[in-house]
Image (cartoon, rainbow, N blue to C red):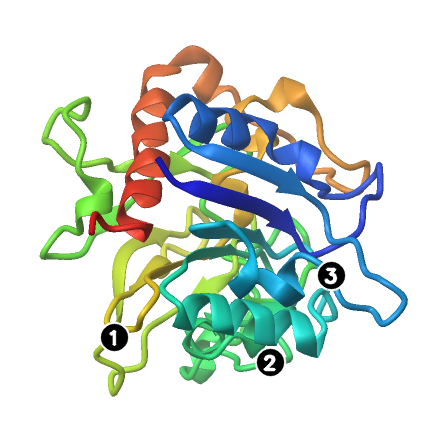
Amino acid sequence: MARILLQTTIPYAADDWHVGRFSLLRDELARAGHAVTARNREPDAGSDDPVLSTLARASFDQLWLMGVDTGDGLSDNDVAGIIAFRDAGGGVLTARDHADLGASIRKLGLLGVVNHFHNFNPEEEPARRAQDDQDDPDIPWPNYHSGSNGNYQRVELIEPVHEIFRSDRAPNGAIEFFPAHPHEGAVGAPASESRARVVARGRSTQSGRSFNIAVVIDGEPGRAVAESTFHHFCDLNWDVDRGCPSFVTDKPGDEMKRDPQRLETFKEYVRNIARWLTPAA
């Protein structure tokens, strides 16, 4: 059993991506036997979050950080607390979204390096600094269109297939369907960095371009996973009837309603990550 902090990078706002919109993820981790604390950022008078800024001294084994800010979601002391937590062996998952959503993650050492945003650390290929999602012209790149909320996307697993994708539920023993989203962000692994590896890619349903959706970091004291979007984990993308903030106007799909089994298989990915982030002693 791991002690997991599920945390957003914004204070509570009813019409935003507060931690209550990740309740199904919280419940799934709890069902797997983990002790889960779910909270939003609660900055004090000095703009520090009292938990994140002291995370290395807290009683957690893992941090699942949902980057839902636009660049200012972590103070310098919050960053220092998370890095110290990783240096002490704590496991971290980060998930962001299109453009600069979750851009405060850029400050988290190697975890920041593997996340590419619009105004910070953009993808190296100039051709990728362009609009992919054509349905939402006001949403800047990176915004890879993997499908509608409520639908699935087939992912390409990179050999050797990482253990977080293993599943006896899947026909070929590996998880190959993820929740889709119309405008995912970008992650990657520098060729010079042996500790980071791309483990899965998606493909845009509009441009046909492939894009990275998950990177693992191993070889530092604390393991880490970086996801291209928090929509792999939020309630909307597991059950569209759970609702979403009013600024989300994309028309949802109904694949998950028609075929819930693939979602149940994907949930094993969540359990696998929680197992891998805190390796057995």
Residue 69 relative to residue 153: left or right = right
Foreground disc of the pair 1, 2: 1
Report the amino acid beneath label 3.
Asp
201 sits left or right of 226 in the view: left
Instruction: Name which of mark 1 and mark 3 comes first in the sequence.
Output: 3
Instruction: Answer few, some or many: residues within 10 Å of disc 2's Cα (few below 14, many 20 plus, some between 14 and 19).
Output: some
User: 269 or 99, which lies in front?
Assistant: 269
Q: Secondary structure at mark 2?
A: loop
Residue at image point 46% right, 74% down: 128
Residue 131 lies, in percent from the top left, at: 57, 65
User: In front of the other: label 1 or label 3?
Assistant: 3
Q: Nearer the viewer, mark 2 or mark 3?
A: 3
Q: Nearer the viewer, residue 75 or 177?
A: 75
Task: Specify the amino acid type for callout 1.
Answer: Arg
The residue tagged 1 is: 195
Read off the residue under disc 2: 120
Expressed as whole percent of the image width and height from the top left, the position of residue 72 reads 74, 70
Measured in 3D between alpha carbons, the distance from the residue under mark 2 to the one under mark 3, in whole angstroms, is 23 Å
- Residue 192 position, x and y percent, is 25, 87
Residue holding disc 3: 49
Give residue 68's quadrant in the image.
bottom right
Residue 241 position in % (x across, y down): 64, 18
Q: Secondary structure at mark 1?
A: loop
Up the image or down, 188 lies above or below 185; here it is below
Badge 3 crowding class, 10 Å Cα cut-off, few under 14, some 14 to 19, many 20 or more, is many
Tell me if residue 267 comes above or below residue 45 in the rendering. above
All told, the count of numbered labels is: 3
